[in-house]
Amino acid sequence: MKKGLFVAILSLLSISVSAQDVALKTEGQDPQYVETIKGRAQKIVDGLQLNDAQKAENVRNIIANRYFLLNDIHSKYDKKQQTERDAELYKHHFELVSALTLYLNDEQIDAVKDGMTFGRLKRDYQATQDMIPTLTDFEKQQILIWLKEAREYAMDAADSKGKHFWFDKYRGRTNNWLSSRGYDLKKERDAWMKRIEEQKAKEKK
């Protein structure tokens, strides 16, 4: 009985150690590209302010490996193979979060997602609220839901242009929806710009 328990403990320790050891998957990648991606991933990790150096390295490697995978997938298919490309992207989509949950909480994982998508979710969400201060809680919730959807798509985009495309696409959806609910977006935007100019004028005094 004791021997069996000892073996089980060793087995659990072995799993724990292997789970904490994440290697960079650089095979077939250009060395210069690898260094660029490592730097990009490290910048995201630095924002998390993790105290454990080994954990930080593992998280960096998970993020970097994600970039390598996305690059491989997008490089594999041409414009006529978008269906096949999207199918493979979807197949691997949830792997990033699954890997990160070993080291990060939900808030930190969201920070990683924001880091990989230029922080557009928070900026767009705040800008919409600033532009239309009278948004209801329901409207804010719906806008946030769509921004989170946009972020999921943007995370799998091939480049910055593709990432911004998804947020712009969902911003269009949001604007159409708000217009259908009676908001005059031009009027709201003009009033917002006026408030910004007035605030700047106050700060100069």
Image: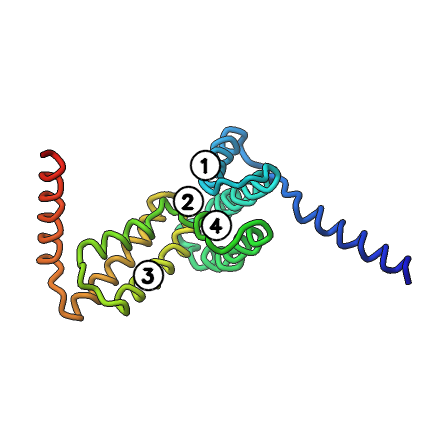
N-terminal label among 4 and 3: 4
Q: Which residue is mark 4?
A: 108
Mark 1 neighbour class, 10 Å CA radius: few under 14, some 14 to 19, many 20 or more = few
Residue lying at 20% horizontally and 61% vertically, measured from the top left: 175
Q: Which residue is mark 1?
A: 43
Based on the displayed image, in which of its 4 quarters is residue 147 positioned?
A: bottom left
Look at label 2 and name its amino acid: Gly
Q: Are marks 2 and 1 in contact (CB under 8 Å)?
A: yes
The residues bearing labels 4 and 3 have C-alpha atoms spaced at a distance of 18 Å
N-terminal label among 1 and 4: 1
Look at label 4 and name its amino acid: Gln
- Nearer to us in this view, 56 or 78: 56
As helix, strand or loop, the secondary structure at mark 4 comes to helix
| x and y, in percent, of residue 165 in the image | 31, 51
N-terminal label among 3 and 1: 1
The residues bearing labels 3 and 1 have C-alpha atoms spaced at a distance of 25 Å
Mark 2 neighbour class, 10 Å CA radius: few under 14, some 14 to 19, many 20 or more = some
Residue lying at 17% horizontally and 63% vertically, measured from the top left: 134
Q: Which residue is mark 2?
A: 115
Q: Are marks 4 and 3 in contact (CB under 8 Å)?
A: no
As helix, strand or loop, the secondary structure at mark 1 comes to helix
Left or right of 103: which side holds 201?
Answer: left
